[in-house]
């Protein structure tokens, strides 16, 4: 995706999207795989899997986090709606986890594995 695609998604001008990313650079660390190379440039997604033609799952998840983070730094109505949806989904997932012990156990195991990696 390029910056103009993301700007259209969030219903903002490309200039304003780039300005918001630069102004909030600490919200988009290198590990988020989400950094603009400049206007009308492709976003930086390292370590593409050439056989599949796409980044590995971990990279894709981090990229999605960066795209989702945009909803918290942009001021369009669409960005606000996306941000509210993200929060509601997170809360609902946490509610589901409290009522499904097996799923909660798997998530906890996954969290421990991620912690061990770092």
Image (cartoon, rainbow, N blue to C red):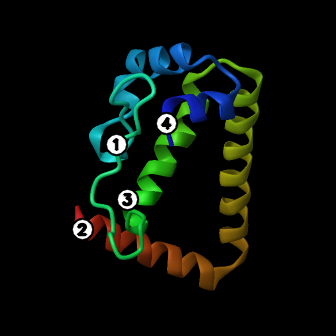
Q: Which mark is residue 2?
A: 4
Q: Nearer the viewer, mark 3 or mark 1?
A: 1
Q: Tag 4 or tag 1, which sits nearer the N-term?
A: 4
Q: Is residue 114 left or right of residue 90?
A: left
Secondary structure of the residue carrying numbered label 3: helix
Quadrant of the rendering where the C terminus is positioned:
bottom left
Q: Residue at the bottom extreme?
A: 102
Q: Which mark is residue 105?
A: none
Structural distance between the alpha carbons of marks 1 and 4: 9 Å
Q: According to the image, label 1 marks what residue?
A: 44
**Nearest to the observer: residue 34 or residue 52:** 52
Q: Which mark is residue 117?
A: 2
User: For the residue carrying disc 3, how many other residues have a C-alpha within 10 Å: few (<14), some (14-19), or many (20+)?
Assistant: some
Q: Nearer the viewer, mark 4 or mark 2?
A: 4
Q: Residue at x 38, y 67 (%)?
A: 56
Q: Is residue 112 left or right of residue 98?
A: left
**Nearest to the observer: residue 106 or residue 85:** 85
Looking at the image, is 43 positioned above or below residue 8? below
Q: Nearer the viewer, mark 3 or mark 2?
A: 3
Q: Is residue 34 left or right of residue 80?
A: left
Structural distance between the alpha carbons of marks 4 and 2: 31 Å
Locate residue 27: give its quadrant: top left
Q: Are marks 3 and 1 in contact (CB under 8 Å)?
A: no
Structural distance between the alpha carbons of marks 3 and 1: 11 Å
Q: Residue at x 30, y 65 (%)?
A: 115
Q: According to the image, label 3 marks what residue?
A: 59
Structural distance between the alpha carbons of marks 3 and 2: 15 Å
Which percent across, then down, holds residue 5? 59, 35
Q: Are marks 4 and 2 in contact (CB under 8 Å)?
A: no
Secondary structure of the residue carrying numbered label 2: helix
């Amino acid at each position: 995706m390029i910056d103009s695609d993301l700007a259209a998604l969030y219903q903002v001008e490309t200039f304003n999207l780039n300005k918001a990313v630069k102004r909030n650079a600490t919200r988009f660390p290198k590990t988020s795989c989400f950094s603009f190379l400049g206007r009308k440039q492709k976003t930086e997604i390292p370590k593409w899997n050439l056989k599949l033609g796409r980044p590995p799952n971990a990279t894709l998840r981090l990229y999605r986090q960066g795209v989702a983070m945009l909803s918290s730094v942009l001021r369009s109505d669409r960005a606000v709606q996306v941000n509210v949806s993200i929060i509601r989904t997170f809360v609902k997932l946490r509610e589901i986890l409290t009522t499904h012990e097996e799923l909660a156990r798997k998530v906890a195991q996954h969290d421990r594995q991620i912690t061990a990696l770092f």
